[in-house]
Image (cartoon, grey):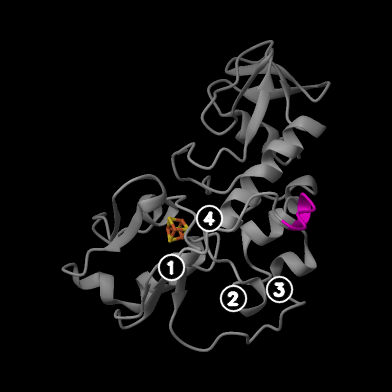
């Protein structure tokens, strides 16, 4: 085998992967979609959402933070894993206030798209009806805390041109709140608002301005259900 490559068995098929890359990356490069919410393109993995859980041996582990190793046997699709993922999606829905029909991100929202993929109907958990604030004080960006799923993509991925942090957070767990460093001049820019809206998997960071220019029904996941671009050789979210 070429140097730097390993072989793993994924869902019964042997695939080659780069030594050290994560199970999620290796699967993606082989056209196998493992769902994620906190994982995003070139960002270092955070392992916060647990959507990418896979089974290795008898252990269920996070696929975005676990590197492949030669001979590893991985299962990424099974009724058990599907139910666990569906449970996480349901918990996210009941923990926040996700009113899909009135959300600007409907059809472009990864949480909604995963709910469709895992056929969520009515969550099996009680709704908590949280009453968080909506912060519209920034010139170009609205922070809708009720929709935040605490993936921290904005904190990890939206930086000023000099590399400084723009987004941060306070508190922990259910009380976590995304914050913006308003002392940084770029925090007020439309450029940062665009980046934030694009990186947020849900409708928690919404750029001020016209929405619904692309009608619901013709948006990204309306046309291409989540994961199918990976299965056709694309890079995914
Ligand atoms: S605001 Fe969006 S990107 Fe930031 S942590 Fe919440 S859901 Fe994730």
As measured in the structure, the alpha-carbon distance from the residue carrying label 2 to the one carrying label 4 is 16 Å
As measured in the structure, the alpha-carbon distance from the residue carrying label 2 to the one carrying label 3 is 13 Å
Q: Quadrant of residue 104?
A: bottom right
Classify mark 1: helix, strand or loop: loop
Span shown in magenta? 116-122
Residue highlighted by disc 1: 131
Q: Pick whichever of labels 4 and 1 is earlier in the sequence.
A: 4
Which residue does the image show at 80% across and 49% down from the upper left? Answer: 232
**Quick check: marks 3 and 4 in contact, CB under 8 Å?**
no
* Mark 3 or mark 1, whichever is nearer to me: 1
Q: Position of residue 100 (x, y in %)?
A: 65, 71
**Quick check: marks 3 and 1 in contact, CB under 8 Å?**
no
In front here: 132 or 233?
A: 132
As measured in the structure, the alpha-carbon distance from the residue carrying label 1 to the one carrying label 2 is 16 Å
**Quick check: marks 1 and 2 in contact, CB under 8 Å?**
no
Q: Quadrant of residue 208?
A: bottom left
Classify mark 3: helix, strand or loop: loop
Q: Which mark is residue 103?
A: 2
Residue highlighted by disc 3: 219
* Mark 3 or mark 4, whichever is nearer to me: 4
Classify mark 2: helix, strand or loop: loop
* Mark 1 or mark 2, whichever is nearer to me: 1
């Amino acid at each position: 085998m070429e140097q730097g490559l390993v072989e793993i068995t994924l869902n019964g098929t042997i695939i080659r992967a780069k030594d050290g890359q994560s199970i999620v990356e290796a699967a993606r490069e082989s056209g196998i979609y493992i769902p994620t919410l906190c994982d995003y393109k070139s960002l270092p993995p955070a392992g916060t959402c647990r959507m990418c859980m896979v089974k290795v041996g008898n252990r269920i582990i996070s696929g975005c933070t676990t590197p492949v190793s030669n001979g590893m046997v991985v299962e990424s699709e099974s009724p058990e894993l599907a139910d666990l993922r569906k449970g996480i999606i349901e918990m996210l829905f009941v923990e926040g206030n996700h009113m899909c029909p009135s959300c600007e991100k409907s059809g472009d929202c990864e949480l909604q798209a995963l709910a469709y993929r895992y056929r969520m109907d009515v969550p099996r958990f009680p709704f908590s009806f949280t009453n968080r604030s909506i912060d519209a004080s920034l010139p170009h960006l609205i922070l809708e805390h009720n929709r935040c799923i605490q993936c921290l993509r904005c904190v990890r991925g939206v930086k000023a041109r000099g590399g400084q942090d723009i987004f941060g957070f306070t508190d922990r767990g259910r009380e976590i709140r995304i914050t913006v460093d308003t002392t940084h001049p770029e925090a007020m820019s439309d450029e940062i608002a665009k980046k934030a809206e694009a990186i947020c998997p849900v409708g928690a960071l919404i750029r001020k301005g016209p929405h619904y220019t692309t009608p619901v029904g013709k948006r990204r996941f309306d046309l291409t259900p989540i994961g199918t671009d990976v299965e056709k050789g694309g890079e995914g979210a």
